[in-house]
Amino acid sequence: MKIHEYQAKEILGRYGVATPKGQVADSPEEVRRICQELGGKCVVKAQIHAGGRGKGGGVKLAGSPAEAEEKARQILGMQLVTPQTGPEGQKVLTVLVAEQQDIASELYLAVLLDRGEGKPIVMASAAGGMDIETVAEETPEAIIRQPFDPHLGLQPFQARSVAKRLGLYGKTARQATKLMGNLAKAYLGTDASLAEINPLMINADGDVMALDAKMTFDDNALFRHKDIHAMRDLAEENALEVEAGEFDLNYIKLDGTIGCMVNGAGLAMATMDIIALEGAEPANFLDVGGSASQEAVQNAFRIIISDDNVEAVLINIFGGIARTDRIARGVVAAIEELGNVRVPVVVRLEGTNVKKGREVLRQADFDFIVASDMADAAQKAVAAAKGDR
């Protein structure tokens, strides 16, 4: 789960990470009032679940409350496009109004899981304020990586080592060392999958502060963090993904044209791969689960074809625990409920009760395209999407 910058700063503040003063607002008039309270100069920052907001015009400096109000009118309601939103962008509903800072230099700092190490790591770079992916690609030597034991936490000597490699010394090094330790505690204490500060600011006096913050969390651990779960902003999430979550379906919207319904994550990944091998792209990842009920299948199918980009549906079911006849009846019931289904549906069934499942499809009023195996299913789905049946 993702949260907004102002929410991430609130959490980091609980762990002793210094951040600029600021308040969130959803109207230009409120922005003006907050800027006045902050001393008359502020920065107005769009709050969406994406980075690169400054490059898209979502971060603006204001030298007076009146200017802050004007900047807010420009940002609030805009469809902000960044490299992380895709071309469709995201509508800005709230802004963070924060006090301006005297920036001497900017660093990058994050705590995340390194799957190769099997441990969390501190990742840091002197190239703060830039896309870390660009830094990693063009100057990988500029990235510092410090693994640490999740049971022991980040040790002071490890944080001091990172600070030294960043070229910090004296008061600044001491503050950075403490901040790194607090950031690691926040990461571990909230079951985060990412805790990122970009940029980490050093001001003219050598003080260290998190100018920006980004946190994401392991959905499976949110039952332990009801306060964080309450920060979820459904307006920032894909509507189909939100609806799928209500039915406990593992659905992720993608950019292709072949809608996929599969039981089992491994088979779902293989199905997506074979579609790509045939020259098309999947429109979604959807795992209905190993013991999918008829109701779950009906909802899954309805969600798939609600995507206007879908030009064909590929249903790939291997019945182990799941009975293929139950899956087939769920699909047929969904089509009957929806009425006029505009896209061709390719079905590949194997496993438990497969003969009964195929008979359900054969007796249905809908003209299913039945496939013999995965390769055949992918070929037929791609051809059907092109209008070649």
Image (cartoon, rainbow, N blue to C red):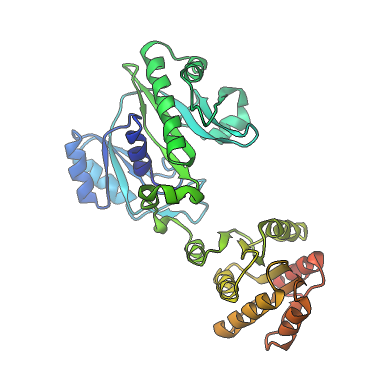
Q: Nearer the viewer, residue 186 or 214?
A: 186
Q: Position of residue 272 (x, y in %)?
A: 70, 58
Q: Nearer the viewer, residue 348 or 138?
A: 348
Frontmost residue, 283 versus 150: 150
Residue 271 sits in quarter = bottom right
Viewer-side residue, 41 vs 262: 262
Q: Position of residue 370 (x, y in %)?
A: 77, 77
Taking the image as shown, residue 174 lies to the left or right of residue 252, namely: left
Looking at the image, the residue that sits furthest to the top is: 170
Residue 19 spot, x, y in % from top left: 32, 32
In the shown orientation, is residue 90 left or right of residue 341?
A: left
| Residue plotted at (62% across, 69% down) | 292
Q: Is residue 389 visible?
A: no
**The C terminus appears in which quarter of the rendering?**
bottom right
In the rendered view, tell whether residue 283 sits above or below residue 29: below
The number of callouts visible is 0
Above or below 82: residue 353: below
Going 52% across and 31% down the picture, which residue do you hit?
Answer: 150
Does 137 sit left or right of 159 as displayed? right
Q: Residue 66 in the image: state x and y as whole percent.
A: 19, 43
Judged left or right of residue 107, residue 207 is left
Q: Residue at x 31, y 24 (%)?
A: 102
User: For residue 363, what is the image quadrant?
Assistant: bottom right
Q: Quadrant of residue 331?
A: bottom right
- Residue 39 visible in the displayed image: yes
